[in-house]
Image: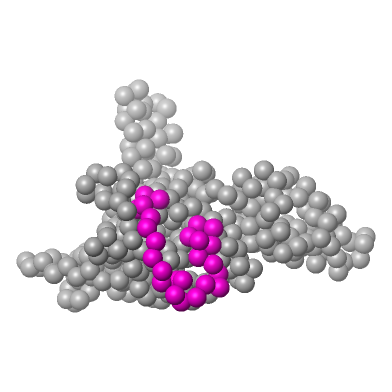
Amino acid sequence: MENCMYLHHHNTFTFFPPSNFRTVPRRRAQSPRVVCEFSSLNSPLKTRSIVGKSLTCVMQNHPLLFHVAVEKELKLLAYDREAAFSHMHQLSSYSHDQTLLHRRIAQVKENQCQIAVEDVMYLLILNKFSEIKVPMVPKISRCLYNGRLEILPSKDWELESIHSLEILDMIKEHITDVTGLRANSSVTESWATTEVRQFLLGRVYVASILYGYFLKSVSLRHHLERNLSLSNHDLPLGHRTALSFNDMCPNGFKDTIFGSSSTMRSTGQGLFKQEMEIEDLKCYAMRFDTGSLQKCDKFRSKEGVNLVGSYNCALFNNVESGLVENDDLILTSFSSLKRLVLEAVAFGTFLWETEDYIDNLYKLKDN
């Protein structure tokens, strides 16, 4: 991303027309001075693929074309991966060595596509934060001053604005559980300081990403069941069938939330028996059985799992020093802890939405 920042400020960026979004930056002899500032340009994770670097430049310099470019790249990646495996399966008449070679080529291509898709996934999430005017927290080591961490501005309102009131109440309880900060705490209490191990902060961040992901999945399921119950209740008794259940499921949501079609039918039939018992979101989530909980409390794709791991490592750990987990003791305010948790919950929410969008263009690997 530093290259794109340099290109943007020095007006040396060459952008091809929409028919070709592979961008080519020009280089200058002098290197720009690195300035550490709280902005999306300083997000901790850097893209690794050519596709990711290209889309990064498009997002920063031509934001109106970003989603068009993403769609084009995802379709190309899906075609490249499919073409490589199709060619591999057509080699039955070739020698054993040639077959192994082309199988290896297909595997390399799949790995390259997966890295590129993880980059696209990350950039889509980054763009969602940009849309609500919230820059993501830079690498924690760059925010520390004499062992103290302060994250300003807090952006609490913006991060809370993406959630419904029901979800926001559950998020506030989560913040209290993981930080000890009460929802109605005073300004003095919010700016009080506490000590925390950096690796524990990283674990809280990942747990909060998963919690935001879980809330997004559960809230969609709850909304769907509530609408189904109300719709079914308005119909005459003889017309109350499970057909409206499929009709009310958005494309891509049915298999994700409820599993197979047989599971959906049985779930729908169970709902009709309880149509007058649809409670609020918190009570609804608390009565999940083990099977339903397992469908909602884990990431759907391997690409999503990889992205969360990579991002957490880039944010909290000193990769250059080779440390897997940083055990340093950090002094920070409860306000800064709240900011980190709110960002992580939003990250999980955006990840759910991003996976759903990408999976319609490029089939993600099931986790």
Q: In this view, does 42 lie above or below 96?
A: below
State the image coordinates of residue 1 (x, y, percent, origin top left): 26, 64
- Is residue 180 in the magenta section? yes
Res 38 seen here: yes
Q: Is residue 132 above or below residue 264?
A: below
Q: Is residue 214 above or below residue 14?
A: above
State the image coordinates of residue 102 (x, y, percent, origin top left): 34, 33
- x 73%, y 60%: residue: 225
In the displayed structure, does residue 295 sit left or right of residue 67? right
Instruction: Using the image as rendered, state which of residue 13 and residue 310 is in the foreground.
Output: 310
State the image coordinates of residue 198 (x, y, percent, origin top left): 35, 53
Name the quadrant containing residue 166.
bottom right
- x 41%, y 69%: residue: 192
In the displayed structure, does residue 186 sit left or right of residue 247? left
Most distant residue in the left direction: 29
Residue range of the region highlighted in magenta in the rendering:
175-200
- Is residue 62 in the magenta section? no
- x 52%, y 49%: residue: 299
- x 83%, y 56%: residue: 274
Res 310 seen here: no
In the displayed structure, does residue 3 sit left or right of residue 113? left
Name the quadrant containing residue 61.
bottom left
